Every structure is written in C-alpha cells, then in structure tokens.
Image: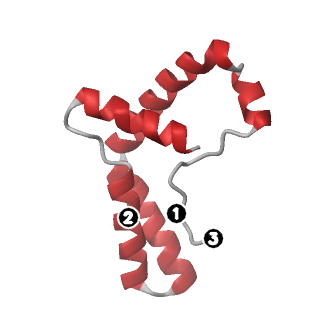
Amino acid sequence: VPLFSERAPFKLSAEFWEVIGGWSAFKRFCEMFEAAYAVAAAHSDEICSLVEAAIVNVSRNSDLARSIADGVRGRIRMKADPKEQKIHIMNIVNDA
C-alpha cells in the first residue's frame, strides 16, 4: 500500500470500537477527532515539512517528497465553512 494512500487515518476495527466505548462514546469520539483534526490543520506546514524531510532522507528524491507532502497538506486542510468541515470529518470517520 503506498504511503498516505488510505482515505481515513485509522481503521474502526472491532477492537478499536471497544476501546472508544462503542456507541455510547461515539459522539464524544467524533468531537475529539474533529478537534484533533483542527490542531493538525493548524500545524499542517510543520507536519508537511517533517513528512517531506523524511521522504527526502529515505528516497533522495525531492520531487517525490514534495508531491507526497503536498498530498498530506491537501488532506489535512480545514474547510472554510464549519458545517462543511463537520461533514468532511464524518466522511473520514465513515470511511474508517
């Protein structure tokens, strides 16, 4: 599987579902995931710089590293409309 090719950053396996508390805690999980996503988006430049540096270090291919970092940046960008952002977050959770 290519690096960063998954649509969701996690898998909602039966074990993970049990850890988060099942349906009774699902709303809280989604709220926390949305807050974490906002923090990641606020620090996307730093995150993408680290990703790019790591890929360059491993592959020695700066074009590939920039392309992957740009893909990550696009995936963690916040939506302008808060309602659209909530939909986006729920789509990520649903894809898991």
- Is the residue under label 1 in contact with that under label 3 (CB below 8 Å)? no
Circle nearer the viewer, 2 or 3: 3
Amino acid, disc 2: Gly
The mark nearer the N terminus, 2 or 1, is 1
Above or below — where is 58 with respect to 43?
Answer: below
**Could you tell me how far apart the alpha carbons at marks 3 and 1 are, in whole angstroms?**
9 Å
Q: Tag 3, which secondary structure? A: loop
69, 57: nearer the viewer: 69
Q: Position of residue 64 (x, y in %)?
A: 42, 81
In this figure, which residue is indicated by the disc labeled 1?
4
Above or below — where is 64 with respect to 50?
Answer: below
Tell me the crowding category of disc 3: few under 14, some 14 to 19, or many 20 or more residues within 10 angstroms, Cα based: few
- Is the residue under label 3 in contact with that under label 2 (CB below 8 Å)? no
Q: Quadrant of residue 13?
A: top right
Q: Position of residue 42 (x, y in %)?
A: 32, 41
Residue at image point 38% right, 48% down = 76
In this figure, which residue is indicated by the disc labeled 2?
71
Compared across the picture, whether 34 is left or right of 93 comes to: left
Q: Position of residue 21 (x, y in %)?
A: 71, 19
In this figure, which residue is indicated by the disc labeled 3?
1
Name the residue at the left extreme.
80
**Could you tell me how far apart the alpha carbons at marks 2 and 3 are, in whole angstroms?**
16 Å
